[in-house]
Image: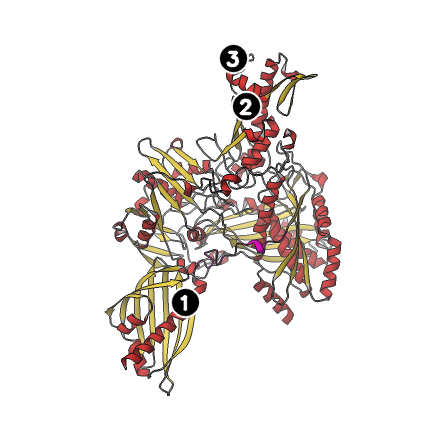
Amino acid sequence: MKISGSYTVNAERQAVWDRLLDPDSLASCLPGVEKLEKTGENEYDMAMNVGVGMIRGTYDGKVRVNNINEPTDYQMYVEGSGRPGFVKGTGNIELEDKGDGTTEITYEGDVEVGGPVGSVAQRMLGSVSKRMVDQFFSCVEDSIKKGS
Amino acid sequence: MAVTKMFGASVKRREDARMMTGRAHYTDDVRRNHTLHMGVVRSPHAHARITSVDTSAAASMPGVVAVFSGADLVDDIAPVPCAWLIPDSDLKVPEYRAIAVDKARFVGDAVAVVIAEDRYQAEDAADAVNVSYEPLDVVTNQEEAVKDGAPQLYDDVPNNLAFQWKLNGGDFDAAQNSAEVKISQRFVNQRLIPNAMEARGVLADFNPGSGSLEVWLTSQNPHIHRLLLSAVTGIPETDIRVDSTDVGGGFGSKIPLYGGEMVACAIAKKLGRPIKWMESRRENYVTTSHGRDHIDYVDLAATNDGVVTGLRVEAYANHGAYLSTAAPGVPTWLFGTMLSGPYKIPNISCTVNGVLTNTTTTDAYRGAGRPEATYLIERMMDLLAQELGMDPVEIRRKNFIQPDEFPYTVATTLQYDSGNYDGALDKALQMVGYEDLRKKQEQLRSEGRYLGIGFSTYVEVCGLAPSAAAGAMGFQGGLWESATVRVHPSGKATVFTGASPHGQGEETTFAQLISHETGIPFHDIEVVHSDTDRIPFGWGTYGSRSTAVGGSALVYAARNVVEKAKRFAAHMLESSPEDIEFNDGVFSVKGSPERSKTIQDVALAAHLAWDLPEGEKPGLEENYFFDPTNFTFPFGTHICVVEIDAETGAVDVQKYVAVDDLGNVINPMIVDGQVHGGIAQGLAQALYEYAAYDDGGQLLTGSMMDYCVPKFEHIPHMDVDRTVTTTPVNPMGLKGAGETGTIASTPAVVNAIIDALSPLGVKHIDMPLTSQRVWKVIEERKGS
C-alpha cells in the first residue's frame, strides 16, 4: 500500500530535522511507542502498540534510518510483527524550508501489511496511518515550541 | 391427521423450537469437566519458511498447560487426508500437515497451538509464541501459478499443477471445423467464502481409562470424520464416537476434515483432558475451505439457426495451498459431467487444471462444481442468442432434450433420469409475463432506460451417488445410505438415518415420510441422526443426497416394518397376510374392515411375543442399506428481471421467478425455504460476494465488514413455483432440493444484466457485478 502526504511545521528546518532524528523525541511523539532502544548507528529496536479498526496489539520490530542528507531528506525503514500481523515499510521524508520560518515535510512510502491487520483492517489503514503521521508531526511541532 | 396427507404437507419444522430458543447443543454449548482450550498461532505470511518456533515465553504464561509446534506433533498425527483421488489425472497430493512444519503456505496456516485452562489464556499465550519466518515469493492466481518461473509451493509438484483431468465425448474438433458460428469467452467464477452461522469447532474428550474418544464436531458427515480421525490418530474406529447432532449450517464447508479438529483429538489423547477449540470468525474466513475460484476458457460451436454442436472448456481451478478432503472431485466430476446442461450437445471436450496457490484451500461449496458448469453453459447460450439475434428462449427450446427422450445419455456420460424442460420454461414465462416484459423493455429502451431479462434453464445432478460411480470417480468411499426403523412397544417409533442434517429440516421431513409409510402419527416418530454411536453408518449430508438417498433407505426400512407387521396382524386376526389390507396404520381383513389391528397393537404384540406367528422373531425393527442405481436430475427455469441505473451502475432486481422441478415434494414449505436460501446465495455471487487477495496473498475480505454476505435489503422478492416430473430412481419419485437455487440463480441474474446493457454492445462482465463494475462498463461503452 502506498502512503504519501505533507505537513507544514511552524518551525525552522534545522530545528525540525534535529527533532525528527532524535530518538527521544521519536519515542515521545510516535503514538503507542512502548520501547525504543538504540542498537547501532541510526538503528533502533522498537515496540509499538497500534490499533487499526478492531485489530489492536503490539508490534515488535526495528527502525533504521538511511541515506541521510542533513537537513533536507532521509529514508526510513520500519518492520514490526506481533499478534495483529506484520508491517514492513520504507519511506522517504523530505524537508523544505519555506523561507517564512515554516518547514514543509513531504513523505511517501510503500507499506506491506499481513495477517489479521491485513485481512480485516487493510481498508482502514490509509486513514489510520495518515492520522498517526499527523499526530507525530504535530507533536514534534509542539515539542519544538516548548523547547524554544 | 390423515396419514396420506403427511407426504406433501407443509408441516412446521420441529427442530426450530430448540434452535430458535437457544436450546440446541451446538459444539460450543457442550461442556465437559476439566476442559482445556486451544489457541492457534497462524502464519501472517502467505508463503514463508519457518526458521524457528520459540514457545518458551508462551509456555510460562498463566494457565498454559502445553504448547506444540508442528514438529512436536509429527509422530502423533498423520497428515490431513485427501479422500477424492481422481483417476487418470496424474494427481499429486502434497503433504498437508495439520500444523505446518517447515513452510507456511497461506495466510492462516497453523504453525503452533497453545493449550490453556481458558480461552483467554490460550489466545494471550498464542501471542507470545515467537515464530521466525523467512518470507518467500507468493502466487495467488491459478493462471500465474502454472507458468514457468512462478513461485513453487512444493518441490514435488512442478508448476503447482496438482492434476490435469480430461473428459471427452464425441469429437469437438470436428464440430468446431464444421461450425457455422463459433463463440469464445473467458469466464471468471470468483472465489467465495462460506458463512455458516456456526463457525467450525470441536470438543475432544479422551478417556485414558477406557481408551475411548468422544468428539463433538461441526460436521456434515460424522461417520466419515470418525473414519478419518481414526486413520490420522491411530485410535480404533470402535473407540471413537462423533456427535454432530446440532450443526449450524455447512454449505459444504463442513465436509472436509481440517487440521484444527485433528490436533484437538490428538492432544486430548496426549494430555488425557478434554480439548475445546472453536474458531473465531476471523479464523473462519482464512482457514475454512472457500468455494468456486475457476477461470474457464469456453468455445462453442453452432449452426446458423442456433443448434449447438460442440462445447470445449479449459478450466483452471484454484485449490489453494493444499488439497482439501473432497477438493479434486469438485471441479472435475461435479463440473465436467454437467457441461451439457439441459441441451443436446453431441461433442464436448473438457480439460481441468487443478492448481495449488498460496491461498486458503477450496472445496465443495453449495452446488460444488455444478454452479460453475451451469453458469458457463447458460452464459454461452445467451452469447449465442446475442450473436444470432435470436430470443434466448427460442435458442434454449431448440436445444432442449425432449421429454420422450429420457433416459437420455449426454456426451459427458451421465444418464439423465427424467425431465420436461419446456414445461418448466412455459410456466416461468407465464408467471413473469414475458411478452409484456419484452414490450416494456422496448419502451424503456426508447427512453434510455436499461431493463433486462435473464434466463437460466438449468439441470443439475443430485442424489449422490451410486457407490460404483463413486468408486469409478475415485471417491474413497461409498455413497449409499443406511436407515433403521424401530417401532417401540408403545407403538411410537425411532428412526435412525445416516444422513446428517445441519439446517435442512429432515427431523421433520423424515418423520413425515415414516408417518406416510407406516401410519404412525408424525408426533410419535423420533428422528435420530449424526451420532456415530447410534447410527449404523452414514455418508452424511451434501450433494442434495439426504432425502433422495437417505430417505429412500428409510422408506424401504419402513416398508419392511409394515410387511412384518402385516404378518403379525394376519396371525392376530386369524387370517393370512395376502388377505390383509393396510391403510393409514390399520391392518384389516379384506372385505371385513371391522376385523382390524392397528400398527400400535401389532408393535405391542411383537414385543410381548407371547404368541408369535410361525417362524417369526420378536420385535419390530428393520435396517436397510440403500444404494441408488442412478443420480437424480432436478431442473427448472429461473427468470430474473433487472433495471440498471446508468448513472450509478446499481442493479435493481425487479422480479425473480423460479420454477423448479424437484419431482415429488415431501414438505413444500421446507423446500421453498431451501429454494429461497439457494437463490439468495447464487444471486449474492452474481452481485456481491468476492474473496479478494492482494499480491502478497493477504485476504482483503477477511471479515463481514469487508466481504459482502447479502443482507435482507439485498434480496428481492421471489415468486417460487414448481412443476412435477417424478424420477424412477427412488421410491419417492423425488430429486433433491438443497442446491438448485444456488446453481440456477447466478446465470439468471448475470444474463439479465447483460441483456439490459446489450444496446450498448456489452457482451460480458465478470462477477460480481457490483455497481462499480457495471458503471465502469457503461462509461467505457458510452465513451466509445
Circle 1 residues within 10 Å: few <14, some 14–19, many ≥20: some
How dense is the environment of label 3, judged by Cα within 10 Å: few (below 14), some, or many (20 and up)? Answer: few
Q: Compared with residue B555, is residue B333 higher up or lower down, i.e. above or below?
A: below
* Secondary element type, mark 3: loop
Instruction: Name the chain letter of the residue that bears numbered label 2.
Output: B
Element class at badge 1: helix
Which quadrant would residue A12 be assigned to in this image?
A: bottom left
Could you say which disc has been placed on residue B610 in the image? Answer: 3
The tag on residue A128 is 1
Look at the image and say whether residue B703 sits in the magenta stretch.
yes
Q: Where is residue B179 in the image (x, y as percent from the top left)?
A: 69, 54
The residue that disc 2 covers is B491
Residue B321: in sight, yes or no? no
Q: Which amino acid does label 2 sit on?
A: Gly
Look at 62% across and 56% down and name the residue there.
B750
In which chain is the residue bearing label 3? Answer: B
Measure the alpha-carbon separation of dots 1 and 3.
82 Å
Q: How far apart are marks 1 and 2 (CA)?
A: 68 Å
* Both marks 1 and 2 on one chain: no
Residue B638 lies, in percent from the top left, at: 66, 49
